[in-house]
Amino acid sequence: MTDLEADLRRVVRGEVGFDVTSRALTTMDPSNYRRVPLGVVAPRDADDVAAVLEVCRTHGVPVVPRGGGTSIAGQATGTGVVLDFTRHMNRVLALDPGARTAVVQPGLVLDRLQDAAAPHGLRFGPDPSTHSRCTLGGMIGNNSCGAHSVAWGTTADSVSELDVVTARGQRLRLGQDWAGAPAGLRELVDGDLARLRTGFPELPRRISGYALDALLPEHRADVARSFCGSEGTLGVLTEAVVRLVEAPPARALAVLGYVDEGAAAEAAAGLLVHRPLTVEGMAADLVPSAAALPRGGAWLFVETGGSSGSEARARAEEIVRAADVLDAHVVTDPAGQRALWRIREDASGTATRMPDGSEAWPGWEDCAVPPRRLGAYLRDFRELLGAHGLRGTPYGHFGDGCIHVRIDFDLLTRAGIGRFRRFSEELAELVTAHGGSLSGEHGDGQARAELLPKMYGDEMVALFERAKAVWDPDDLLNPGMLVRPAPLDTNLRFSVLPRKPVDVAFGYPADGGDFSAAVRRCVGVAKCRTTASSGPAVMCPSFRVTGEEAHSTRGRARLLHEMLAGEPVTDGWRSTEVRDALDLCLSCKGCRSDCPVGVDMATYKAEFLHHHYAGRRRPASHHSMGRLPEWLRRVDRVRAAAVVNALAAVRPFAALAKRLGGITPERRIPKVATETFSRWWDGRIAPARDAPGRSASDTGDLVILWPDTFTEHLSPSVGQAAVRVLEAAGLRVALPPTVHLEKAPVGDGRTVALDPVSLLRGRGRVCCGLTYVSTGQLDRARTVLRRTLDLMTPVLDTRAPVVVLEPSCAAALRTDLPELLHDDPRAARLASRVLTFAEALERLAPDWRPPALNRPVVGQTHCHQHAVLGDTTDRRLREAAGLTGDLSGGCCGLAGNFGFEKGHFEVSRACAEEQLLPSVRQAPRDAVVLADGFSCRTQLEQLAGVRGRHLAEVLAEALGASRESR
């Protein structure tokens, strides 16, 4: 391997990676299979590709071309050298609107081509659900299709010419009339014309095998079309000329409700006469909430186009009238259509979990039958599942007869793997009996190639082998795929994982307490590799900035998988490769909500750091920022805030403190409040307690306002404002106890208030443990949280909710607390009591109306708010206050300690520049800059010189103004 690496480095201008991280990142695609490569090369151009092929041929090492790594059959994995085209060969080289063509490189992400074509009213027809991260090279290699194939066909229908390099270094330009055909290919076809004319099933989604019938004279001997779907086994694509189609100016979406998937499947073929753009189907099992859908247990999504909105709608309504439906909606609003399509696109991930949370896997992801046979096929398919004791939820391209399904195979035990094989063999026979194709979109790979004789017969498969030998006589390119395949039950990705649960700190309740199962959540659909900045999504901010696979949620999950496997990551929890990949994880929790399968990399990172540094010296930042609540309490105890602020303003002292604390020199140290929120509260309520009579707020519902570290010591104005607003809404406010009360207060918390003064006296302080968790100090976090639960026990004996102003602290209490203290029932009780500021007002003071501000709003929804808490109530509160406009998505980039840590500043700033800072710069001058999180406000202040405010501050200021106006 050393000689191979050295030889590649001598001739390749792109990157050559034989390191542990590079190899670990490419062991898998979203299939069930895993292979560990020798190394990864990111070629810069066709010359690099040719050089790699020459060196690998000399060493007898196979080569595997790889795009976005979103293939589902195993063809993007291999044991030799992987070619990663996404790093350099990823551009649109030319676009001719008149000819409706584009020249693209294989590593180009489909959405980037769509972005380039859109200003000309054009688009690339095929659009798989992974369009935001799959590449043109991968689409050509698999002959991908997508939702719009009923209108625009497969990728092969959109290819004009292809530049490829063969395994022996020939550079060919493939096209029609035998253009670019390697020597011997024409003779092979001419010698078997009868078989090629009769041996392929007629259906729109026949992807399996080699498309040798495209070489028939009546098909103009189209070598480029024949190359599509060859899965990197015939040659390496370096450039493509593709055809574009005219995009309809307007679209409408008819959502048709049926009793079940069988009824939807029976109806799909009959809608094709209306020339829709799509006919997609899915059942209720895959829909998180059917609130936005018409009545039914399954739905068809039928899209229509038109020159105007009214024309598109008229075509959609015509389809509704023609369809025998239980219920139907026609959606013309683009935002509403996007929301519905997002449900369908996320099915590739959500289908990996059954409704009861158990795992489901690909393997029979995309069989296709003639559309008119789909209903009958689905009935037989369901019977076969039942006969084997298996479950699956079909969905997909009903108009083309193509079904996606994940099945709850047991791929961990010998018995389960045996059942997987038997089911696969019987399903292949069932598909063939219905005149179908084993693959209708994602290719055969290792998942189905072994079974191609059932579809084509031995003689046609032998012809495939001869075609492979014409193109690649040395079997250098992606061996084991399509011809002479590896058995479908070998190289399974799960076979290398530990059989017993790993000893971990968090409870992982959704995964049965098994960390391996949590890591297995990442099936590799790679939604985290999306770089588009539109919409509310957060995941994955570090990948959006660096573009590196290691900094994506999928990349980190891959490294954790290989760490558990013990190869190529061999150091377990001590792995520096895993540590370095997790270093740029902002712990934003965006993946917890944006990942279709709910990967929670923030929790995995905390778990890893806990084990990685056990008994070892931690980074300075873990002590300075991870234990921030302790330092700030000590400053408050000796009343040293003014001194600390003065020293932080002196450059030499600040520089020394930052160097000792592991803080990046570009950051300013935030000022510590000279009067904490609790001291303000104590001074405020002591006179009120002694005053005669009761205030108006004494009769309202009691809420416990959580004095989080940031509100308490760094932004007490937020807490003060919240008190004013909550009391104005008629609520009674108290703070948590600071001493452990042996006896709970009398009453249920609604009729008898906890004495606010007595609750403040003492030494203890509640804490959500956030800073300890984010730095992996989980033992310390447990101690802090248990102390918090002890203090909160009297509150938990009441019905009082707990209002938390800092979104990250609220998220920690909602999720980290019960998952870390899963053995303490009080943790779940406290988590269930947590309300955000907006939730408290909406639930406890529904009749209260905020003052009208009637101003535009700008800012960013906090990452943890988006991922864990949700912002629906916040949006309603803003609307009620006349704050118009939407907050941006993404991440501010500071993310607690992340943006302060040495080495993170550039990434932190780049994250802010992705959405937050541009939105603030472009906002109207009178816009209210909202930032509920302390990190977000700090980032705005330090990078843009803008003061962001918590929503409570904005409302409190408006309340004061309204009083003055009276």
Image (cartoon, rainbow, N blue to C red):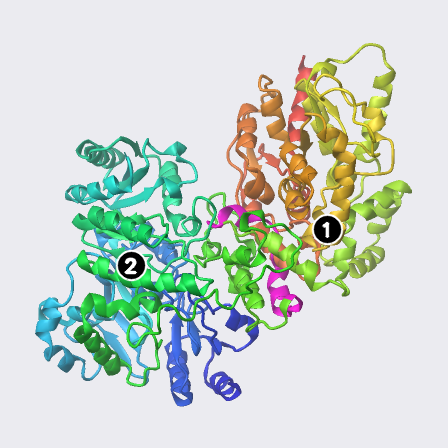
Q: Position of residue 908 (x, y in %)?
A: 62, 54
Vertical side of 237 occupied by 516: above or below:
above
Residue at the location (21% across, 74% down)? 461
- Tell whether position 594 is magenta: yes
Q: Which residue is mark 2?
A: 441
Q: Which residue is mark 1?
A: 772
Magenta segment, prevailing SS (helix, strand or loop): helix
The answer to whether residue 234 is left or right of residue 410 is left
- Tell whether position 865 is magenta: no
Q: Where's the C terminus, which quadrant? A: top right
Please report the bounds of the magenta region as a residue range. 573-597
Q: Distance from label 1 to label 2 (Cα)?
A: 46 Å
The answer to whether residue 282 is left or right of residue 781 is left
Assign a secondary structure to mark 2: loop
Q: Quadrant of residue 933?
A: top right
Front residue of 508/661: it is 508
Q: Quadrant of residue 78?
A: bottom left
Front residue of 737/319: it is 737
Callout 1 amino acid: Tyr
Callout 2 amino acid: Glu
Vertical side of 829 occupied by 942: above or below:
below
The residue carrying pointer 2 sits among few (fewer than 14), some (14 to 19) or many (20 or more) residues within 10 Å by Cα, namely: many
Sooner in the amino-acid sequence: mark 1 or mark 2: 2
Vertical side of 570 occupied by 417: above or below:
above
